[in-house]
Image (cartoon, helix red, strand yellow):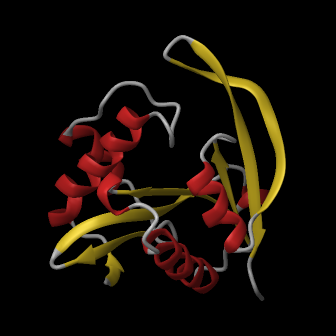
Amino acid sequence: MLIREAKDGDLIRILDIYNQGITDRIATLEMELKDMDYITNWFSNREGKYKVLVAEIDHCVVGWVSLNPYSHRCAYQGVADLSIYIDRNHRGKGIGKALLSNIEKEAIKSKIHKIVLFTFPFNQLGQSLYTSMGYREVGIFKEQGKIDGHYVDVMAMEKILAK
């Protein structure tokens, strides 16, 4: 497995994997599938420390992770939000751990002090990944958003990075 920075040629696979996360209803509150215009715009608006990394197996992208701005306020410049998505045929095989490990190294280089993420409490695979990598539960937002017309809880997690 190769972990590397994403490039324009990866966007089709990044989009496909993101749309799997939307369809599978385990990784995001998004409900509508995204298109190439959406993902191209998202990728072109990445700035400096907000990296996107991909995991590649046999020259095929099988997962991706990104650091995202947590807030526009200057007090939060050292905090990044995390997104991670793994192709449904490759989940539970260590790809998430490799991506998280590498994005944390990039975050430290970029002077990011803390990473936060939001996940569903029912996403057992995600929970085991995050806790194994040292993320701690901050709390649960009750009925934070709707999926298929039903309110769901969202768990906040965080990790303070090594100095």
> Residue 104: x and y, percent?
59, 78
- Which residue appears farthest toward the top when viewing the image? 149
Query: In the rendered image of this protein, does residue 111 appear above or below residue 120?
Result: below
Number of callouts: 0
**Which of the pair 118/62 is nearer the observer?**
62
> Residue 124: x and y, percent?
62, 50
Q: Is residue 158 visible?
A: yes
Q: Is residue 78 visible?
A: no
* 66 to the left or right of 118: left
Q: Residue at x 65, y 62 (%)?
A: 128
Image quadrant where residue 87 sits: bottom left
* 30 to the left or right of 123: left
Q: Residue at x 75, y 68 (%)?
A: 159
**Which of the pair 3/50 is nearer the observer?**
3
* 118 to the left or right of 4: right
Q: Residue at x 17, y 53 (%)?
A: 12
Image quadrant where residue 120 sits: top right
> Residue 33: x and y, percent?
30, 30
**Which of the pair 57/41 is nearer the observer?**
57
